[in-house]
Structure formats: C-alpha cells, structure tokens
Amino acid sequence: MNNPPESNAELQHTARRNLWMHFTRMSAYADSDVPVIVRGSGPYVFDSHGRRYLDGLSGLFVSQVGHGRTEIADAARRQASELAYFPLWSYAHPQAIELAERLADLAPGDLNRVFFTTSGSEAVESAWKLAKQYFKLTGQPERYKVLSRDIAYHGTSMGALAITGLADIKYPFEPLPPGGIRVPNTNFYRAPDFVADDITDFGRWAADEIERAILREGPESVAAVFLEPVQNSGGCFPPPPGYFARVREICDTYGVLLVSDEVICAFGRLGHYFGSARYGYQPDIVTFAKGVTSGYSPLGGMLVRDAIMEPFVRGTATFLHGITFAGHPVSAAVALANLDIFEKEDLLGNVRAHEAGFRATLEKLYDLPIVGDVRGDGYFYGIEMVKDKDTRETFSDEESERLLRGFLSTALFDAGLVCRADDRGDPVIQLAPPLICGQEHFDEIEHILREVLTEAWNRI
Ligand SMILES: Cc1ncc(COP(=O)(O)O)c(C=O)c1O
C-alpha cells in the first residue's frame, strides 16, 4: 500500500534533511520553505500549499505540451507493460526505430541517423566524441578542438562543460578536457561599438570571429563548432541576419562540423520542429533533449547527417560510445505520443500564430525604467534589466545579488510566475512558456512582471 501523502511540514523537513537540489544554494532554504511542486495542469503547476503558478519556463524549457496529459501517461503505462527496458547496445526495439524514423523525417536535410541519449549533456558529449572519432576514422586524427560562444551553456558533464562558456561553473572542475575554444556570442544589445549600428554587420563580424578562431588554432586541429539557434544563457540571443549562412560557409571552407545544440530550441520552442529550420541552415549534427518528450520521461539524442555516419557503416568501424538508458522504450513511446499531440493540436501553428503577440506583450514592459532589452523569438524570450536605460549600464555584483537572489526570484514565484532570474551574463529574466499558451497567458506574465519589476526598481 502507498504511504499517505506527507504533510507540507514533513516534506519540508525531509527535503532539507535528504534532498540535494541542482545548481541551488542550499543555505537559501535554511530559514525558508523549499518550493515543492506537486501537480500540473496545462500551463499551470500547483505547490504543496495548493497555490497555482503559471509555468512561464516550461519547467526548464521542457514542458512543450503542458502538464497533465493523460494520453502520454497512458502511452508510458502501455509501453512499461509491454517492454519496460531493453538496451540499444546491439539490439533495437520498435519504439526507438519508429521514433528515429519520425525524427529523421522532421529534421532538415539529410539528418537521417539518430543516436539516443538520456539528456542534453549526454547529447553534447556524444556529439563531441562522434566528431573526434569521425575525424580519426577519416584520416584527420589531429582534429579535436571545439568552438563555442561566450556565456553559452551546453551542459555539465566534463566534455559538455568544456564546451560551455560560463567560467564560474567550470572553474571548480578544472582541469577540463582540453580543446574548448570561445568565440563571441550574438548579443546585439552589447555589441562592440564598431558594429553596434547595424545588426547585419554585427552578425558578419561575430561569424567571422569563428573563422579567425579556426585560423588562430589551426584548421587542422578544429573538429566542430557548437552553436544554439538562439543562445539561451545570457538571455536569448537570436542570430543576426546572415549569421548562420556565413557560419555554414566557414565550416565548409575549413572542414569543420557544425553542431546545432537544440536542446532548448527544437520541438516547437521557435515555431518549428528544429531551430535550424527556422533560420534556414543545415547542421551536420543536431543535439536535442527536453521538449522531445515534454518531460514525461527523460530522453535526448543527436541527429547525424548521412555523410558523418558513412565511415561507421563499413567494416569493423564502431562508434565506441553508449549509455544504458539511452532511447529507453518508455521514453521513446512517450516521445511518439508527445509528437502526436504536436500534430493533432498544431502546436507549431499555435506558436507561429501567437509569437508576435508574445513579443508585443513583453515589449509593453519597455515603459519600466529597469527594462533595457526584450529579445528572443517564438516562445523564447529574455528580458535584460539595467540600471540606466540610456547608457545601458548594468548592475554591480552586489546589486545583482541583492536584486536577483535577494528579491526577484522569490518575488516572481510568490506572485504566481515560474520563470528564471539569471545573472550568468548580465541580469535577465528568462521566459519559455508551454507551446499551448496564448494571449491570456502572455497578459498574465506581463502583469506579474510589471508589478514585481516596479517593486524591484523601488528597492535598488
Ligand atoms: C543548449 C543546452 N545544451 C545542453 C544542455 C544540457 O542538458 P541536460 O540538462 O539535459 O543535461 C542544456 C540544458 O539546459 C542546454 O540548454
């Protein structure tokens, strides 16, 4: 028999005693409640006190179809009864096969081969390992370096962390695997002066910096460039016009693989199945996770072009990499049910129909003195907060600490909005609501942000 549900006081006690939350200052909960989310329905979640919150971050950029979808739960139950587990090491199962075909059909160009993982970090890690082994197999064994952008987050395992561009979260774990090289990101709001007047010039400069880095490192040593369609960390940097076309050209010139890290940007976040399709570029590898199952079960993976797979389909060649739970039958069945909902409810159409409304609603906040920049695409936005709109001066570390950790994160949650106040770059609020949302939800987000940001400004 199940234990009776624990009271909130018991949950709080046990959470403090036994649970280690991720990227969390545990001391912050010494004297205050751990937020305990117990239930979800559509774009809302409910805590252990029964309070309702609009899930403005889709959990963690995950819950595309929203919460409480019994048809996905049913698919998981059916699959667990039929075949709960079997590995993809030398075997296959129908759900992995069907999902691989479906993803290949949805992906741009000849991204026809799917290697499953359980998470985004594993997908990124796998893509780097694949790039390295691919070049060893094809007679260019010295290619191992990877380029990625300042402040970009690509995951936490050692390889993915070496690709991540956030010094603070890397430092405790150094030395990391060698070969991670940084290039500028596409934050036009903080563009260098000489390209600050024209976004196309800025994009050209940012892309050309990739070429300069390849030449500086030696093209024969560079394996891949890892880029998100819209960079999340730092607060949503969409690509300037022409950026990805130039990056593709550079990669082709120097024989470097273009990896599109779509752990956030795939599965409708930008109104397309893949972010690369929205911006019209062809990656060599796409990494994905999160939205592929809308979080009803963990799954990640990479989609690989036929040409990259080609050396692995001959003779004794084997990609020497695997993960026990990768492509788990229950997760694959869940992903298929998730994609059925995308189709049935035309979620991509919903995002495309409402994204202009989302932008316009958030842009209303420009009348607040603290709102410096509203940027993003699709259902994926960042709002940068500044101390001075005219000069774009940002907050000091102390102010940022007081503003973000001391006030904003808790105040937004208390006001009924799940979103993220982050200062891994400049201070931003990140928003990524479920793809089922419409104008009423955008209005609710704007209303809460307006109240809380007004109060934050008064406290500075
Ligand atoms: C772009 C990107 N890559 C990789 C990851 C790592 O994914 P995971 O947390 O599933 O390991 C994330 C996570 O947010 C991400 O945003």
Image (cartoon, helix red, strand yellow):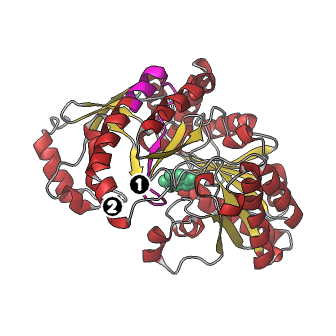
Q: Which residues are magenta?
A: 422-446
What residue did someone put label 2 on?
399
Q: Is residue 44 left or right of residue 284?
A: left
Closer-to-camera residue (407/100): 407
Q: Nearer the viewer, mark 1 or mark 2?
A: 1
The reply to whether the C-beta atoms of the residues labelled 1 and 2 are less than 8 Å apart is yes
Q: Amino acid at mark 1?
A: Lys
**Residue in the image at 42% along x and 76% along y:** 172
Mark 1 / mark 2, whichever is N-terminal? 1
Q: Is mark 1 within 8 Å of ligand 1?
A: no
Report the residue marked by disc 1: 387
Q: Name the residue located 48 percent from the left edge and 40 percent from the top edge.
A: 62
- In the rendered image, the vertical position of residue 373 relative to residue 82, given as above or below: below
Please name the amino acid that badge 2 sits on: Glu
Along the viewing direction, whichever of 310 and 195 lies nearer the viewer: 195
Q: Nearer the viewer, residue 397 or 105?
A: 397
Instruction: Let me know if residue 69 appears in the view.
Output: no
- Label 2, secondary structure: give it: helix
- Based on the displayed image, in which of its 4 quarters is residue 316 positioned? bottom right
**Rendered location of residue 368, percent (x, y):** 41, 40
Residue 438 position in % (x across, y down): 49, 22
How busy is the neighbourhood of tag 1: few (under 14 within 10 Å), some, or many (20 plus)?
some
Residue 162 falls left or right of residue 35: right
* Residue with the most extreme right position: 253
Q: Position of residue 434 (x, y in %)?
A: 48, 31
